[in-house]
Amino acid sequence: MTTILRRLGFYVLAAYAAVTLNFFLPRMLPGNALQALLAKMQTTTITPQQLQALADQYGLNSKQSTFSQYLTYLGHLFQGDLGHSTSKSIAVTQILSKDLPWTVGLVGTGTVVAFVLGTLLGIVVGWRRSGLLDALLPSATFFQAVPYFILASILLITGGFYWKLFPYANGYDTGRNSNLTQGWNGPFITSVVEHGVLPAATVALASIAGWIIGMRNMMITTMDEDYVLVAAAKGLPRWKVIAVAARNAILPTISNFALSISLVVTGSIVTEIVFSYPGIGYQVYLAVLDADYPLMQGILLVVTFTVLGANLLADIAYVILDPRARKEA
Amino acid sequence: MATPTVTSGPGTPGTGEPVVGKPARARRGSRIPLTPKVVVGAAILFVFALIAVFGPMIAPHSADWQANATSSTPLPPSGKFLLGTDQQQHDIFSQVLAGGRDTLLIAFVAGLVATCLSVLIGVTAGYVGGWVDEALSILSNIFLALPGLLILMVVMTPLPPADTDNPLLIGLVIALTAWAWGARVLRAQTLALRNQDYVESARVIGERKPRIIVFEILPNLLPILASSFIFTVIYGIGTYVSLSWLGVISPATSTWGTMLNTAQQDSAILGGYWWWYAPPAACVALVGIALALLNFGIDEIINPRLRSARDNRKGVKYVLGLTPVLRTADRTRVGGTHRAAPGPAGLPTPVAAASEGKSK
């Protein structure tokens, strides 16, 4: 229990740090950078009042002290106010609540698929060490070493553009002839699944090599343990012996996963941009193009929270799987 | 098993003779196992290092050179333009040659700075312990959870082009988002090392802490250090290319990322102009793969058990509970596995033997 409380304490601290960083980032930039940004906005449809509000938000020409600005910022945040998007003229939270489910769905699906397939493959490769599959490992690094957007583009070009296996743009059919109504109805869900295949495959492919290699390496190390030998000596069926080894080998891979979550999430952001997927990743791209600073900051905050949430889930999974983690004082 | 296999892979003419029968002392000379993976990785990397240094010089045209100012149809590869041209009639081949320098330099700077930071923070945390460890661990865990690419986007979008054009500055900023992973791994390893007897004895002798860290602990962290350096360089390349592909930073000189950016903006994919986007993407991919292959080799130094026996000799079967004979003292090898295969009292041997046919 103390372990979990300690971890929860860490998450509170990390969330606070993210919020604070979000406040100071625009203020740490070289002085005139934001001024230039605001000047760029002036040309777009934005009222002088809105511009003034923005300048206040980033502490430009403000008479308030930084500390009281910070308090105001925290106060707004607690009321769930992330400011106004300058390019879309609606509240940032509104945009985020529309887009976040898409991203979470994409990252979630991709990660679960990569975890299940990667772990199973890793077990097999590790158990049949030096088998044929071992020779395939270096090719797995291709997916690990290539930036997400290149991998995504490869899938888009092959599976989407040339072979026409799956649609490669948008989250669902938005064509002129489509008569889809958003919601829990059959046609819409089918369309969403079809459009999700390529992006989710990108996320899964990019992270699967990590799972395979991590699991293989842990399997090889674990198989030398005496308890695996005992299990085999008892005459257990082979799959049970493998299960004994795998059960223990999986723990470090899960804690390693916690290290890579933020890479997976940022990767899926890039993937969304390639596939024009309607999640927050594509939104941040639009925000960059429009120099929509409040929206970018809101997305940064929400993504950080998503990563922390995923970390928490990995922590909980670890505590469930490893009794030692529960006992630790 | 009949042919003598060479443990040091191809590419090392000096040590090309079989080292199988030599005593362990002789083999220790090179700690890096020259498996095909490492050799291929190093070779690719060497080529790209040459391109980074000499590329802009040997390029037939400058990156801004235009074949003609009137046409706006990309030309396919031909004898005149090895990789064709893009929509503005720039020579792709020259751009690819010239575009590697900044990318690799930035990734290298990012890797170097991030590795230094991770040593400073990770080793200090692991060796000093106590509240220092607590605080530094929390710091690196927080940095791990921050989405680096997004922060870089938020930081760099408002920056004036003059700043985003400075490779050293960009490398530095990327490093700030990349050190935490290495710090965490190094801390864990330092924790394991600090209570080793030899460190203990150095402490008893009265060595000062900095000396112990630098001369006793750091040398044993080298493989992990190298692996985290390579990891960071891969990350740096990916991040920099992604940022310039997104158009968040627009360097004055053409790089692989900006080439991909213009290709994307002029919808090269839809136009079917593969020679426009494929070469820069392939370069980025190749550098990444080369680095990942090197990392394989380093992983095998850290933990020799991970070494894939396929690299060195064919046919050694790892059997649960038995130590496979990888090297025998005499050259007339009877075959390690043969002796092991029957297994004493038929213990767990069937496990692996049966796995031949059954698994799938």
Image (cartoon, coloured by chain):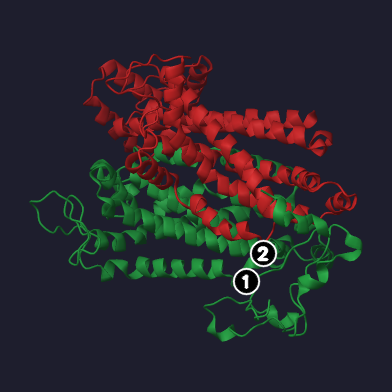
Q: Chain of mark 2?
A: B
Residue A200, horizontal then vertical, whole percent: 48, 35
At x 41%, y 20%, the residue is A95
> Residue placed at 25% from the left, 30% from the top?
A39
Cα distance in 3D space between marks 1 and 2: 9 Å
**Looking at the colours in the rendered structure, which chain would you say is drawn in red?**
A
Q: Quadrant of the C terminus of chain A?
A: top right
SS at circle 1: loop
Q: Position of residue A208 (x, y in %)?
A: 56, 45
In this orientation, which residue lies closer to the viewer: B56 or A273? A273
Q: Amino acid at mark 2?
A: Arg
Colour assigned to chain B in the rendering is green
Q: Nearer the viewer, mark 1 or mark 2?
A: 2
| Residue tagged 2 | B307
Q: Quadrant of residue B132?
A: top right
Q: Is residue B263 left or right of residue B238?
A: left
Q: Please determine if labels 1 and 2 lie on a single subunit.
A: yes
Residues at discs 1 and 2 in contact (Cβ within 8 Å): yes
Q: Nearer the viewer, residue A6 or B355?
A: B355
**Label 1 environment density (alpha carbons within 10 Å; few <14, some 14–19, many ≥20):** many
Q: Quadrant of the N terminus of chain A?
A: top right
Q: Amino acid at mark 1?
A: Pro
Q: What residue is pinned by disc 1?
A: B33
The chain that hosts pointer 1 is B
For this view, does B324 lie left or right of residue B82? right
Q: Earlier in the sequence, mark 1 or mark 2?
A: 1
Identify which residue, A236 or B310, lies in the foreground: A236
